[in-house]
Amino acid sequence: MRKIIFVTGNSHKVKEAGDILSPLGITVEQNNCGYPELQEDELEKIAAYGAEYAAKKLGSEVMVDDSGMFINSLCGFPGPYSAYVFDTLGNERILKLMEGERDRKAVFRCVIGYCRPGEKARLFAGEVEGEISHESRGNEGFGYDPIFAVGGRTFGEMGEDEKNRLSHRYRALLKFSGWLKNPGLKSTY
Ligand code: IMP
């Protein structure tokens, strides 16, 4: 088993990454050392900066995860500001913003940043298309899971296994693990 340090304060992300990566021969270990979360308009920039910062700070290879939910009818809001908006508005206020809106399409994106000390970060992106539900449903998962639905069911209504088979995080981690096994591969996107 190869062990990679996952720098994040979010233990839900660590659990999901562990469940997805362990069958692929990779274990993850959470490290809470933190990194400055840039207020940038692209998840890629935030993940790259975080991975490079943490690799330097810890002196070892690390991975980070920056994710965001992009709502079509709100021009991609909250996107890269998803953490701030979740903490300030929360799911119920987002549902309020969406009241009467027929276009409920949304995309969840995840960018995994991986970095070794002294190197540039490598990025692996995954996304899943879904819809903002009309009400909060389900108690599973975390964050926006109760209002983000795929195939009519919110992530909050799905068990971990079901979410982990189709999520943005799963898709990004699959690319990441493929590259780890074959680092000669050029493209990460
Ligand atoms: P960040 O990647 O930690 O910046 O996350 C942005 C926001 O999206 C936070 O409020 C997270 O709780 C939320 N979030 C990230 N990943 C997921 C997910 O898989 N499901 C639901 N919410 C998520």
Image (cartoon, rainbow, N blue to C red):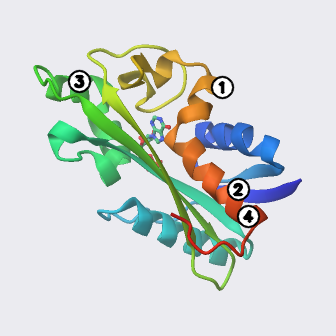
Disc 4 crowd, CA 10 A, few/some/many (<14, 14-19, 20+): some
Q: Nearer the viewer, residue 87 or 42?
A: 42
Q: Is residue 10 visible?
A: no
Number of labelled discs? Answer: 4
Q: Give amino acid for label 1.
A: Asp
Asked if the residue at tag 2 contacts the one at tag 4, i.e. Cβ–Cβ closer than 8 Å, the answer is: yes
Q: Earlier in the sequence, mark 2 or mark 1?
A: 1
CA–CA distance in space, label 4 to label 1: 23 Å
Mark 4 = which residue?
180
Q: Nearer the viewer, residue 47 or 183?
A: 183
Place of residue 164 in the rendered image (x, y in percent of width and height, measured from the top left) = 61, 33
* Side of 55 where 67 appears, left or right: left
Disc 2 crowd, CA 10 A, few/some/many (<14, 14-19, 20+): some
Q: In the image as oriented, which residue stretches furthest toward the bottom?
A: 118
Q: Give amino acid for label 3.
A: Leu
SS at mark 2 in the image? helix
Q: In this picture, is 32 found above or below 15?
A: below
SS at mark 3 in the image? helix
Q: Which mark is residue 177?
A: 2
* Side of 15 where 99 appears, left or right: left
SS at mark 1 in the image? helix
Q: Earlier in the sequence, mark 4 or mark 3?
A: 3
Ligand 1 lies under 8 Å from the Cβ of mark 4: no
Mark 1 = which residue?
161
Mark 3 = which residue?
95
Q: In this picture, is 111 found above or below 132?
A: below
CA–CA distance in space, label 3 to label 1: 26 Å
